[in-house]
Image: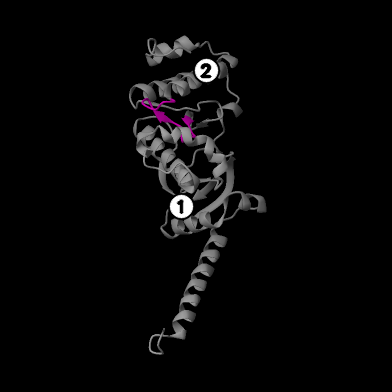
């Protein structure tokens, strides 16, 4: 039983007011800083959990504003944003939809970095975000052109914003370049594959014309959540897929390249059959 000395009605009102004031402050800040038109976009990725994480990142100064969406996929949406000094950034928000991520469990289950991670629910989505950040960091530090990772929190990843003439950098599939430039791009990407395999002991895992951006005259690899180390049980299968996709695309664009050329360049003649 609560005695009269222990009970303070004002404490309840005060706590309620503090909570209410905090919520109003969050809504006010987010309304001011998120400049995205369209109700559908909000409903797709801006659930309550995500709003709270964005609020924390804005209070910490990692993000200042979020502008418009620049890329949409089944697992995430990417937005252009800015930091307080006006530096543009890319803000990737993974959808809080566990059904979408169930098919990605196999990429996490065999990764020694995430052996203690829950393979279901929100923890799987958060692990997927952390995995992409870790892979981007490894590749960037290893000299491969990828968006430089800046920070992450739960289902939100902040990274370098890639652009071309004040517009979001285009996918490789959307650029119109001549044969000489296409050959240059193929050599650059083949060099990335070589570095990935031989120096970083990794495989991209989803290499295609959809996951390469062109910025500043260079191809950049993106969407590396599924990238794995060579000790992963799916590594060989994913490498074969990367090689096949690479050769298919560039042969279709008049580059003289074959699976054997790629295998020889990487130096895996005795380790794999495509």
Residue 208 visible in the current orientation: yes
Check the image and name the residue furthest to the bottom.
4
Q: Distance between the residues labelled 2 and 1?
A: 39 Å
Q: Classify 10 Å Cα crowding around label 2: few (below 14), some (14-19), many (20 and above).
A: some
- Quadrant hosting residue 269: top left
Q: What stretch is highlighted in magenta?
A: 220-234
Say the numbered circle drawn on residue 238: none
- Residue at image point 35% right, 37% down: 113
Specify whether residue 241 is painted magenta. no
Check the image and name the residue furthest to the left.
199
Q: Where is residue 80 in the image (x, y as percent from the top left)?
A: 54, 46
Query: On screen, 269 above or below 192?
Result: above
- Residue at image point 46% right, 9% down: 260
Query: For numbered disc 1, what is the local secondary structure?
Result: loop
Q: In which quarter of the image is the N terminus?
A: bottom left
Say the numbered circle drawn on residue 83: 1
Q: Mark 2 points at which residue?
A: 244
Colour scheme of this structure image?
one colour
Query: Which one is in front in this view, the residue at disc 2 or the one at disc 1?
Result: 2
């Amino acid at each position: 039983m609560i005695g009269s000395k222990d009970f303070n009605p004002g404490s309840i009102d005060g706590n309620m007011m503090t909570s209410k004031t905090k919520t109003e402050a969050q809504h006010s800040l987010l309304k001011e800083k998120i400049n995205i038109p369209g109700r559908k976009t909000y409903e797709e990725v801006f659930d309550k959990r995500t709003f709270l994480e964005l609020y924390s990142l804005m209070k910490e100064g990692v993000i200042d504003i979020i502008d418009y969406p620049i890329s949409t996929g089944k697992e995430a949406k990417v937005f252009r944003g800015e930091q307080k000094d006006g530096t543009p950034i890319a803000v990737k928000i993974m959808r809080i939809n566990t059904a979408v991520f169930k098919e990605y469990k196999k990429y996490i289950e065999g990764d020694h970095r995430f052996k203690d991670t829950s393979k279901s629910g929100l923890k799987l989505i958060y692990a997927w975000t952390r995995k992409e950040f870790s892979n981007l960091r490894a590749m960037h530090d290893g000299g491969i052109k990828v968006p430089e990772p800046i920070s992450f929190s739960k289902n939100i990843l902040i990274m370098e914003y890639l652009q071309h003439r004040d517009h979001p950098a285009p996918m490789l599939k959307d650029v119109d370049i001549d044969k000489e430039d296409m050959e240059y791009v193929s050599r650059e990407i083949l060099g990335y594959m070589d570095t990935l395999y031989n120096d970083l002991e990794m495989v991209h895992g989803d290499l295609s014309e959809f996951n390469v951006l062109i910025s500043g005259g260079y191809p950049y690899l993106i969407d590396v959540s599924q990238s794995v180390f060579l000790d992963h049980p799916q590594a060989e299968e994913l490498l074969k897929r990367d090689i096949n996709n690479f050769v298919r695309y560039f042969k279709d664009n008049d580059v003289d390249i074959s699976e054997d050329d790629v295998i020889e360049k990487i130096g895996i003649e005795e380790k794999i059959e495509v």
